[in-house]
Image (cartoon, rainbow, N blue to C red):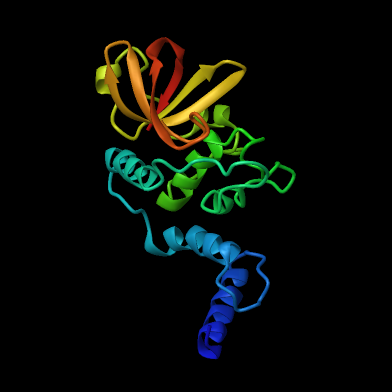
Amino acid sequence: MSAATSNFVRRVQTRLNQRGERLDLDGVPGPLTVTALDRVLPDLAGPATDSVADLSAQHYALAREYLGLREQPGRGTHPRLVPMFELTPSWLDRDDSKTAWCGIFRGWIGHRAGSGLPPAHYRAAAWATWGKSVALNKPQAWRQGDTVVMTREGGVHVALLDRVEGAFAWCLGGNQSNAITLAHFPLSRITHVRR
């Protein structure tokens, strides 16, 4: 990296710190700097979409960019998941094979879209309070990209709706068979739909 680029990155880091970030002024555009910049850009640009429906579509489009990404085998975390984990508390285990990361993935999508995150977004259940409620008894009104919270064996899962087919909702989400995939879930397990 050239000295001019490093100096520019250092100036960006300084300005980000003035906005409340806590970055080292090292001149390196690493994942912490990029994540901090992602947090600030929506504030500077304003809302990315004009309507809630557009926001669901934007969430879905962003999530599709990661479709097929799998956990890293063994100890550690897949490099593309690392920035997602950096939005979580430091006490949370950063090993993608040990931590349920569906809420972390949904949080990353909300972060990138500038649509906000609920407190403790890394917990799937926290997404039951985000956004506005959509009627559970009207799956025909659910939209692609709506946030779906459901029960699972041993806990809660969160994902984005792809489509409803019969008694199943197809969802795009993280930590589905240790990857970001499309998977189907019984409508009876869905506890919240948010937009």
Q: Is residue 94 above or below residue 185?
A: below
In this rendering, the count of numbered labels is: 0
Q: Residue at x 54, y 59 (%)?
A: 35
Q: Can residue 94 be seen in this snapshot?
A: yes
Q: Is residue 132 left or right of residue 4?
A: left
Residue furthest toward the bottom?
A: 3
| Whole-percent x, y for residue 110 in the image | 45, 45
| Whole-percent x, y for residue 71 in the image | 55, 41
Answer with the quarter of the image where residue 159 lies: top left
Q: Can residue 132 be seen in this snapshot?
A: no
Q: Is residue 43 left or right of residue 134?
A: right
| Whole-percent x, y for residue 170 in the image | 34, 24
Q: Residue at x 66, y 76 (%)?
A: 25
Q: In the rendered image, which quarter contains the C terminus?
A: top left
Answer with the quarter of the image where residue 69 lies: top left
Q: Nearer the viewer, residue 160 or 125?
A: 160
Q: Residue at x 72, y 48 (%)?
A: 90
Q: Residue at x 67, y 35 (%)?
A: 98
Q: Is residue 89 above or below residue 7?
A: above
| Whole-percent x, y for residue 14 in the image | 60, 76
Q: Is residue 17 above or below residue 10?
A: above
Q: Nearer the viewer, residue 145 or 165?
A: 165
Q: Nearer the viewer, residue 97 or 83?
A: 97
Answer with the quarter of the image where residue 172 lies: top left
Q: Is residue 97 above or below residue 66?
A: above
